[in-house]
Amino acid sequence: MNNLNPRQQEAVKYIDGPLLVLAGAGSGKTSVITRKIAYLINECGIKAHKIFAVTFTNKAAKEMKERVSRLVQGKEAKGLTVSTFHTLGLTMIRYELDACGLKNNFSILDADDCQRLLSELLHKDNSPEADQKQALKWISKKISDWKNDLIPPVQAVSVAQTKEDLMAAHIYDAYQRHLRAYNAVDFDDLIALPTRLLQENQAIREKWQDKVHYLLVDEYQDTNTAQYLMVKLLVGVRGRFTAVGDDDQSIYAWRGARPENMVELTKDYPQLKVIKLEQNYRSMARILNAANAVIANNPHVFDKKLWSQHGLGDLIRVITCPTDRDEAEYVANDLVNTKLMNRRTFKDYAILYRGNFQAKAIETQLRELQVPYKLSGGTSFYSRAEIKDVMSYLRLIINPDDDSAFLRIINTPKRAIGPVTLEKLGVYAQSRGVSLLTACTELGLAAHLGQKKAVVSLHEFGTWLEEHQREILDNTDPVPKIRQLLSDIAYEDYIRETAPTPQGAEVRLENINFLLNSIQNMLNKAEDEEDKNIEAIIRKLVLIDLLEQQAEADDSDRVQLMTLHAAKGLEFPHVYMIGLEEDLLPHRNSIDADTVEEERRLMYVGITRAKQTLTLTLAERRKSGADFRSTTPSRFLEELPQDQVEWQGRRSQKSPAEKKRIGGAHLANLKALLNS
DNA sequence: ACGTGGTGAGTTTTT
DNA sequence: CTCACCACGT
């Protein structure tokens, strides 16, 4: 989009005060933010390093920064900050280490490590085995909520109402103290620590308010309490910011996002200007009509009605299939047929679903037809065991206090050090007030540990790692030294021995290679000295999904398979949404938790991904475990404007016998269709 | 300390 | 079905 419409232009040029842009799906909100940043630099003479933009993902940040660079022609964009809240928080922590109570080599613990720490604390706290898993889940959510609401452990303890809350608060307290002892933070801390600092320390607040001349926040409906507070504290009373969001696309409330923050903004800033972007540039009118009709069933604070200049387009198809297998078969066949007919490429097609497990059936069918596909989502790069192992070695090297990393790799590969030994080591380390790694090389350890063998193993490990630590940290070219470390422990052999298949081993080794190459690249590309050090890079690595960079280079022609959540922000000419059944979309748990409105927004997001055609499918019977369960069509299908919809193979409301007959006829039709 | 068989659960996910 | 986790045996 080269030219902006008047509304968009208004949003770009309005800088007199706080601005909320209510941007509907496909209304070009990213263009508005990008152009606005360029406008601030080019026309308003604001220095790029005084402009901060916050996006939902690193990928979005990268893209936005590139687009801005093009608009302002190169060098002017240098110093511009476009990042996620977490990366911004990390930057702030790095500037305010002392005030945060951290040393400069602190680690960032990922969700897995936090869970493990919590489960250990929970275990110590007695409690019955039975529902420990549930308790763990409950407590980690509770702690995350507390952090997002900036409630410190002391306060959590003092306001606890129930016995469970009190117990959780105590564990929260222990958890937080352990993190500090490890010189580590978790993801929530990346937001909570700097925000609390801004709140409590006037000097620091003023410093940052001066640094941030103008703030732009994308996907504002996805901010949580702490993030909104951070925004408020950064912009202060001057309120020089633009927030862009769509309350109808809020699909992350389950992990703390508060779409209410949009309304909150109108209260906190009475002078707030609200601009609505309602023209959609993406979809055919029928698709938009459907989206509008569905979302109209949700209560709204801000009225918004999308419209399009495009033509009506094809009817929206709703296809009822006998089973989930037939559903997958139908989608795969239909896709191949229409692709041929319309002379489209595979990457013009997306198949969207509620849960990752639904992908499997589709995959099977696509493979059968030899259709290339790209499955996004699934296990992220960093949750892969081999990456976590290598990262743990690196983390331990930059931060010897990181007990969590120590525990992960002390026996990987096997060094014959078991839980009993570690328990004793832990007790000793605690009594001496040192980290596990430090305890390994202390002379006093031998007296506390009966087994001589274990003492030797631990001591060997400790001195060995210290040696490598020096090698890696003191070297200007550390990556070869890291490779040296891995070959020292024969990690390659370990991978080959433990991988289920030889191919699996190769993939894992490639992953490690990719990680090390990425570190090398980041070292080479780092502009200032600050970023050129290996410690900063390792810390940053935790926050960046390297796979995205890999994916970017890959623009091969493949059908896109992803969850509805993963599809947010994307668009495709032809979209299939599968599994439109009660208990799936809306999901059973959401029905139980009374959050069907969020599921409806998910439906809305799915519909609005489509540019030209939209096909919705459902199965009458779905395989769950060993047996089939019959399903009910999703309530959202009834909410569609029925005159825009073409039903195929609809379940009849007549007698079961008739139903069967029609079902049989439908199957014959389907077969005929597939053979054609 | 570590491998194996049996049992049970089974959204969404970025940082 | 399939993966993850636990208890048990070696």
Image (cartoon, coloured by chain):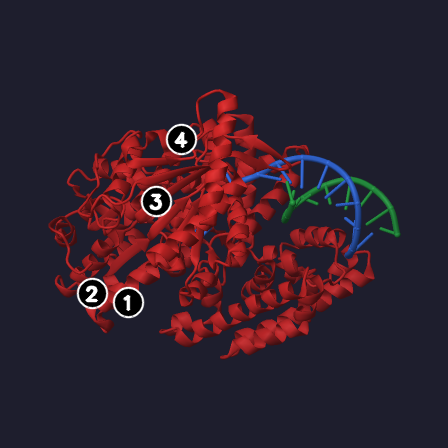
Chain colours: A red, B blue, C green
Which of these two is toward me, A86 or A566? A566
The residue at which mark 4 appears reads as: A596
* Circle 3 Cα neighbour tier, 10 Å, few/some/many (<14 / 14–19 / ≥20): many
Are the residues flagged by discs 3 and 2 in contact, CB closer than 8 Å? Answer: no
* Circle 4 Cα neighbour tier, 10 Å, few/some/many (<14 / 14–19 / ≥20): some
How far from the left and from the top, in percent, is residue A11?
16, 50
Depicted A529 relative to depicted A341: above or below: below
Are the residues flagged by discs 1 and 2 in contact, CB closer than 8 Å? Answer: yes
Indicate the quadrant where residue A392 lies. bottom right
Q: CA distance from mark 3 to mark 4?
A: 22 Å
The residue at which mark 1 appears reads as: A79
Q: Disc number at residue A298? A: none
- Badge 4 sits on which subunit? A
Q: Is residue A282 visible?
A: yes
Q: CA distance from mark 3 to mark 2?
A: 45 Å
Q: CA distance from mark 4 to mark 2?
A: 45 Å
Q: Are marks 1 and 3 on the same chain?
A: yes
How far from the left and from the top, in percent, is residue A569?
33, 51
Q: CA distance from mark 1 to mark 4?
A: 43 Å
Looking at the rendered structure, the secondary structure element under dot 2 is loop
User: Which residue does the image show at 59% across and 65% down from the upper left?
Assistant: A507
Left/right placement of residue A531 relative to residue A611 reads right
The residue at which mark 3 appears reads as: A614
Looking at the rendered structure, the secondary structure element under dot 3 is strand
What amino acid is labelled 1 in the image? Gly
Q: Quadrant of the N terminus of chain A?
A: bottom left
What amino acid is labelled 4 in the image? Val
The residue at which mark 2 appears reads as: A47
What amino acid is labelled 2 in the image? Lys
